[in-house]
């Protein structure tokens, strides 16, 4: 699929990785009840940061490069690395969070438009890991 950006400007190619990131953003947005605009915005409160970090982690797992993920979320690739490391630490210590990630990963692959599962609040029971 191509998007045109205006007269005289070459069309922007949507790569499979870009499409996958968009699917993951929508899945995470729906799961955590956070607007996609907040996932790619500048907000830094916990209610947005954790879902954004989850989405970046899943995008990396899906094979997107660090620069691709950074562009998709309006972040530097170092921020993406930090998000990946944080989610990996949470996965090691929290089995409930691991189940959430597995569920989101499968939803991101199928790109559901609606879901019949109940809404889930942010997983905040994990111990604080600092930065």
Image (cartoon, rainbow, N blue to C red):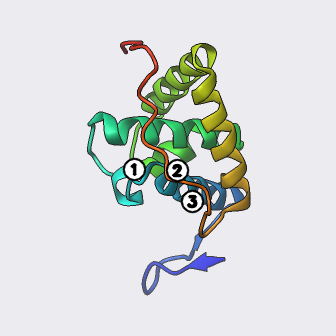
Contact flag, marks 1 and 3 (Cβ < 8 Å): no
| Above-or-below relation of 111 to 91 | below
| Above-or-below relation of 94 to 24 | above
The image quarter in which residue 118 lies = bottom right
Viewer-nearest of labels 1 and 2? Answer: 2
Say how many tags the image has.
3
The image quarter in which residue 51 lies = top left
| Above-or-below relation of 92 to 123 | above
The x, y position of residue 49, in whole percent, is 37, 37
- Image point (49%, 52%), residue name: 119
Classify mark 2: helix, strand or loop: helix
Q: Decide which of 96, 49 is in the foreground and name it.
A: 96
Contact flag, marks 1 and 2 (Cβ < 8 Å): yes
Q: What residue would you read off at disc 1?
A: 39
The x, y position of residue 13, in whole percent, is 62, 69
The x, y position of residue 81, in whole percent, is 51, 26
The x, y position of residue 22, in whole percent, is 57, 59
Classify mark 3: helix, strand or loop: helix
- Image point (31%, 34%), residue name: 46
Q: Quadrant of the C terminus?
A: top left
């Amino acid at each position: 699929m191509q998007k045109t950006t205006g007269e005289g400007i070459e069309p922007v190619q949507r790569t499979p990785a870009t499409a996958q990131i968009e699917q993951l953003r929508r899945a995470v947005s729906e799961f955590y009840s956070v607007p996609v605009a907040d996932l790619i915005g500048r907000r830094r409160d916990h209610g947005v940061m954790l879902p954004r970090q989850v989405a970046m982690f899943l995008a990396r797992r899906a094979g997107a490069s660090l620069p691709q993920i950074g562009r998709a979320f309006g972040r530097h690739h170092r921020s993406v690395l930090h998000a990946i490391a944080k989610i990996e630490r949470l996965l090691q210590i929290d089995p409930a969070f691991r189940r959430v990630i597995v569920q989101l990963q499968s939803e991101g692959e199928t790109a559901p438009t609606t879901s019949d599962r109940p809404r889930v609040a942010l997983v905040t029971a994990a111990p604080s890991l600092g930065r």
